[in-house]
Image: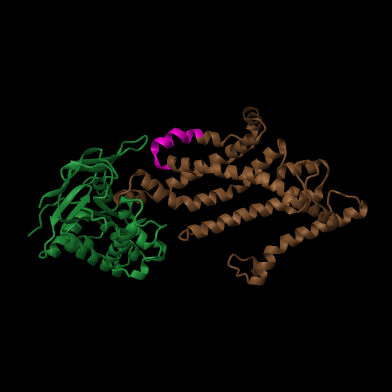
């Protein structure tokens, strides 16, 4: 598979007035291939979301490059779908309007057949994400957290993005709903083959979801975070893999191989 | 004293009595004072009694202005109250229309950093200018016609609305804006179809809360230089101690303002069913 996302020597620093800049990421080199489901985990504040925002185009690196298909991309666009943890839906629109928002941005007015087709398509995505048609005319604040995230996923998927970026999208959900949502993402990924980058601080979630796991962390407190672990998930050696990731997350230890 | 606990549950009749008590007390106090003054001086005009008020209301609501040559005939739609209401209402509507560019400017200042940098410091300074202090300048610059009065309202209220819209725009979560771009929206799509739609109910609330300020500046302009309008009439009648007409006028203005406020609140709720006030 060819490289879709390339993060080359990326460093991110935030200026602090009257102090030395705060290093968030330093020396990040990652290559993500088309069709991978990469989970990124690490401690709170290690720069997971910053890395996702760099790929999204919502933030610029201080040094280095973020390449999509070998080219630098500017601001966020329809090639990169986004599901954040909070504020994932437009509160002033119903579920159906939220899902059809993207396609209607292509044309200001939609009439007759095209409008009907779009509604059908939206209902299809609604069903695909496990929602009922009766939910279509509800506003986001009338839905539970899990249902809101389902709508957010449908809203992103209807645009058929090449990359889906999910930032702790399930962290506010209860364990049962979280499990359902994880299964949904696995199924959608297996079906559509979209490249997914999923940020989480939950190690079990990272291993269950990812075809590959990246662990970010700081070796020294004053340094920016680096990739401490970059590992393919295989069905075998799951226990050892968990221990290795836990070790990297908890102790900030850099190890690139699964110990025998 | 269980009534004064923070968790007191108030039943419907008690709530009704509590909310109307001050109205009843105020009206009672007024008529008590009026009666007392009339016992001392039956011709007292400062606190008119029921008969004088009735006469005043009848004059205001049914008779045209004796000084106005163009006003002919009697009845509500020829009455001085109606002609004054129409005159003030026109100025009020003009001022409200001029608030639309203020909303648009505030929105753009919040969305586009260049526009924000360009205007913010100036608007912050402008907001500190006491509008009434520039009234003489306005009369010199724009004359004593309609424009000066409308400009007074604009100068008095616009900076507040601009800054309110700016802050409301800034309060829209960044995730929503990024999300808009990922769904194919461009700058103006995000500005008008995501941000404006989300802040609009709060903008309407902000305008609603500034209605009194709009009326205040309108009244200031009309009292100083005008030939018609509600405030003009109140200022004119003050010279003749016409309290029996002034009081109905004041209550009429309060009623109008209440109705405008109510209309805006209902419209806001109907237009934005998703909006929950904090």
Task: Report the residue that reaches farthest toward the left.
Answer: A260
Residue A7 x %, y %: 18, 44
With B244 as the anchor, is B273 left or right in this view?
A: left
User: Does residue B55 appear to the left or right of A40 in the view shown?
Assistant: right
Question: In percent of the image, x 71 and y 37: which residue is there?
Answer: B226
The tint chain B carries is: brown
Residue B115 colored magenta? yes
Query: Residue A138: where, in percent of width, then height?
Result: 40, 65
Q: What color does chain A have in the rendering?
A: green
Residue range of the region highlighted in magenta in the rendering = B110-122
The answer to which quarter of the image holds residue B71 is top right
Q: Nearer the viewer, residue A49 or B50?
A: B50
Q: A242 or B85, which lies in front?
A: B85
Q: Quadrant of the C terminus of chain A?
A: bottom left
Residue B181 vs residue A7, the one in the foreground: B181
Q: In which quadrant of the rendered view does residue A121 lie?
A: bottom left
Q: Nearer the viewer, residue A169 or B211?
A: B211
Q: Is residue A63 magenta?
A: no
């Amino acid at each position: 598979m060819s490289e879709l996302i390339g993060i080359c020597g990326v460093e991110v620093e935030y200026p602090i007035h009257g102090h030395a800049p705060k290093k968030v990421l330093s020396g990040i080199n990652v290559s993500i291939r088309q069709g991978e489901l990469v989970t990124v985990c690490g401690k709170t504040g290690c720069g997971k979301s910053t890395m996702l925002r760099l790929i999204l185009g919502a933030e610029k690196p201080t040094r280095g490059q973020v390449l999509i298909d070998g080219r630098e991309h500017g601001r966020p666009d329809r090639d990169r779908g986004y599901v954040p943890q909070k504020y994932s839906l437009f509160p002033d629109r119903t579920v159906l309007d939220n899902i059809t928002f993207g396609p209607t941005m292509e044309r200001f007015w939609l009439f007759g057949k095209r409008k009907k087709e779009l509604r059908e398509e939206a209902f299809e995505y609604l069903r695909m994400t496990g929602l009922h048609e009766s939910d279509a005319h509800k506003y986001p604040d009338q839905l539970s957290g899990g249902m809101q995230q389902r709508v957010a996923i449908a809203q992103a998927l209807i645009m058929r993005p090449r990359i889906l970026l999910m930032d702790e999208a399930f962290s506010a959900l209860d364990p049962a709903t979280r499990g359902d949502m994880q299964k949904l993402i696995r199924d959608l990924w297996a079906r559509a083959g979209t490249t997914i980058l999923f940020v989480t601080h939950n190690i079990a979630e990272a291993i269950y979801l990812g075809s590959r796991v990246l662990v970010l962390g700081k070796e020294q407190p004053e340094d920016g975070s680096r990739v401490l672990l970059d590992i393919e998930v295989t069905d075998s050696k799951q226990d050892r893999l968990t221990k290795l990731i836990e070790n990297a997350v908890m102790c900030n230890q850099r190890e690139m191989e699964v110990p025998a | 004293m269980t009534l004064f606990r923070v968790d007191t549950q108030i039943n419907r009749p008690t709530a009704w009595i509590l909310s109307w008590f001050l109205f009843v007390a105020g009206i009672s106090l007024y008529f008590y004072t009026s009666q007392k003054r009339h016992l001392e001086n039956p011709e007292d005009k400062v606190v008119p009694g029921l008969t004088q008020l009735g006469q005043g209301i009848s004059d205001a609501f049914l008779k045209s202005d004796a000084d106005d040559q163009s006003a002919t005939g009697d009845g509500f739609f020829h009455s001085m109250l109606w002609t004054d209401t129409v005159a003030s209402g026109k100025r009020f509507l003009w001022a409200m229309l001029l608030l639309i560019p203020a909303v648009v400017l505030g929105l753009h200042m919040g969305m586009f950093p260049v526009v924000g940098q360009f205007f913010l410091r100036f608007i912050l300074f402008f907001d500190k200018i006491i509008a009434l202090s520039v009234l003489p300048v306005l009369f010199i610059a724009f004359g004593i016609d309609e424009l000066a009065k409308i400009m007074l309202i604009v100068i008095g209220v616009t900076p507040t609305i601009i800054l309110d819209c700016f802050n409301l725009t800034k309060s829209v979560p960044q995730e929503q804006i990024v999300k808009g771009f990922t769904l194919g929206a461009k700058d103006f799509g995000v500005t008008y179809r995501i941000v404006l739609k989300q802040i609009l109910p709060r903008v309407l609330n902000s305008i609603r809360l500034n209605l009194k300020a709009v009326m205040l500046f309108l009244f200031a302009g009309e009292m100083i230089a005008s030939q018609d309008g509600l405030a003009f009439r109140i200022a004119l009648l003050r010279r003749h101690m016409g309290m029996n007409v002034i009081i109905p006028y004041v209550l009429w203005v309060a009623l109008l303002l209440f109705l405008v406020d109510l209309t805006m609140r209902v419209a806001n709720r109907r237009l934005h069913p998703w909006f929950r006030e904090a």
